[in-house]
Image: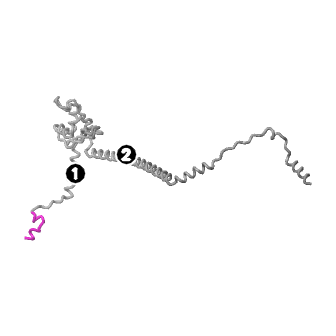
Amino acid sequence: MEEARGSTGAEGSGRKEAKVPTREEILKGSVGKVGKSKKSGIVYLSRVPPHLKPMRLKQMLSVHGKVDRVYLSLEHGSGSKSKNGKKQGKSYSEGWIEFVDKKVAKHVARLLNGEPMGGRKKRSKYYYDLWNLKYLPGFKWENLTEDIAYKRRVRDQKLAQEVSAARKERDFYLSKVDQAKVISEMEKRKREHGGEEALRSIEEKRSSRVFPQKRARPDPVTDKTPRLSKGLLSLIGGKGAR
């Protein structure tokens, strides 16, 4: 009984083991996928009417042939919030439709291009919109996904650069604000700690003020009288001493 309970193999559980695919089967499957991709065809839609969704577009074109995938490119700013805070509906600018058979894709592009999207039904909201379809020879869905991935990388890099520039500008501004705060604090401390010294220096400056003096005016009486020269006075003084 214990051995039966402990048995967890394929025979005990009654399940068959998963078969490992061989190299030939893997290559055959990959060739099948490549062959399917070669048989498919892409049609380009240059204008998408307002409020037309990918699922609705696929339904409209599936009437003429089997559609595999549909991709619609969002307009710039579509789906974002408005000024009122309400989320806007999604609107698309262009699209790509992949038909399983490229012959059907060519036929649909020739048949519908320039025709009303709503058909003959005037009640249809797409009655006044025209199909703008073009078959893209040699273009595959892989090319579209690569192009989308490349544009996304470019957009992400641009956004990262803008964010980095904004951060640098913010850090520079904050550093200047912090520097100004530090300088103001230092000046405040200097004023607080050096208040007495500043008062002393002001008093010293006031006490040591130098007032300009006017030159004495010459006396017209005394200054005009003739004076003896120093040499003559010395001679006179020498004779008196003898």
- Left or right placement of residue 84 versus residue 168 in this view: left
Mark pair 2, 1: CA separation: 44 Å
Question: Outermost residue toward the left?
Answer: 1
Q: Which mark is residue 98?
A: none
State the image quarter where residue 197 is shown.
bottom right
Residue 146 location in percent, x, y?
29, 46
Q: Position of residue 28 (x, y in %)?
A: 20, 53
Q: What is the magenta range?
A: 1-13
Quadrant into which the N terminus falls: bottom left
* Disc on the earlier residue, 2 or 1: 1
Image quarter of residue 224: top right
Quick check: is 10 in the magenta stretch? yes
* Badge 1 amino acid: Val
Residue 72 seen in the current view: yes
Q: Which residue is outermost to the bottom?
A: 2
| Pick the front one: 142 or 177 | 177
Numbered label tally: 2
Locate residue 95, reporting x and y percent: 25, 39
Residue identifier under label 1: 31
In the image, residue 68 lies in the stretch drawn in magenta: no
User: Residue 111, position in %: x, y?
Assistant: 20, 33
Relative vertical location of residue 48 with respect to residue 199 in this rendering, above or below: above
Q: Is residue 44 visible?
A: no
Is residue 188 or residue 51 the one in the foreground? 188
Q: Which residue is depicted at the point 66% across and 45% down?
A: 211
Q: Which residue is mark 2?
A: 162
* Whether residue 10 is situated above or below residue 241 in the rendered picture: below
Rendered position, 128 above or below 223:
above
